[in-house]
Image: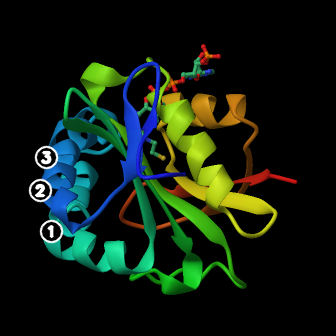
Amino acid sequence: MGDTRPLATGTLRRGTVEDIASFVELGRAVVPPTYGPIDAAYAQRMLDEWWTPEVFATSLERNVHVVAERDGQVVALANLGRLTRSYRDFPDVTGEREVMWKLYVHPDHQGLGLGSRLLAEIETLVEGDELWLEVVDGNDRAVGFYEAHGFAEVERSADPHWPDDLWFRKALR
Ligand SMILES: CC(C)(COP(=O)(O)OP(=O)(O)OC[C@H]1O[C@@H](n2cnc3c(N)ncnc32)[C@H](O)[C@@H]1OP(=O)(O)O)[C@@H](O)C(=O)NCCC(=O)NCCS
């Protein structure tokens, strides 16, 4: 990807530290409607623990971020990184994985192709031959989206306090 790439519905570019405030704002718009119906406390925990300026500063050092802009506003975010470089622990998982940690489109801009385009861009950045991601159990719209884009569920990480995470994988080559 060059610096910018025109799209039918916006522009894709790499994310930088200049985008951190926009990322936090995007989280406040998209996390509650996505996860509130599944577990409102979990939605709040996500915002408090994972959609913070500090976490994005670390994430930008370790992961590639791609943003979609429309009319100069960041309306969607995706990122890619290696499991072993995550700030989270995954006791259930052995080995290395290239993981799309985030794919989030602002609710006002969903269904316009931005999620598909960001996913396609992330796939071009994968160095190995498969891409992994996690979906919160109950996020049926995202599951449908990923299955329609060639992902299949591989395993489930259970947690006694929070919704399970479903690991999905797509073979790329
Ligand atoms: C899931 C999400 C990333 C998809 O992005 P989007 O920009 O809304 O989706 P797009 O417009 O690119 O693509 C929609 C395509 O997926 C298909 N699709 C969407 N939901 C689907 C579903 N539940 N079942 C089957 N197909 C589905 C549509 O038919 C469409 O296909 P088409 O392009 O062939 O018509 C976006 O809706 C989002 O951010 N949701 C909230 C946050 C979230 O759940 N993120 C994932 C966290 S793991």
C-alpha span from label 2 to label 3: 6 Å
Tell me the crowding category of disc 1: few under 14, some 14 to 19, or many 20 or more residues within 10 angstroms, Cα based. Answer: some
Which of the two residues, 110 or 47, is positioned nearer the viewer here? 110
With 157 as the anchor, is 40 left or right in this view? left
Q: Which three-letter amino acid code belongs to the residue tagged 3? A: Glu
Give the quadrant of residue 87: bottom left
Which residue is pictured at 57% across the width and 76% down the height?
82
Disc assigned to residue 173? none
Which residue, given by chain and number where applicable, does mark 2 sit on? 21
C-alpha span from label 3 to label 1: 10 Å
- Up-down: is 115 above or below 20? above
Which residue is pictured at 63% across the width and 60% down the height?
125
Disc assigned to residue 25? 3
Q: Which three-letter amino acid code belongs to the residue tagged 1? A: Pro
What SS does tag 2 mark? Answer: helix
- Up-down: is 17 above or below 71? below
Find out whether the residues at labels 2 and 3 contact each other: C-beta distance under 8 Å. yes
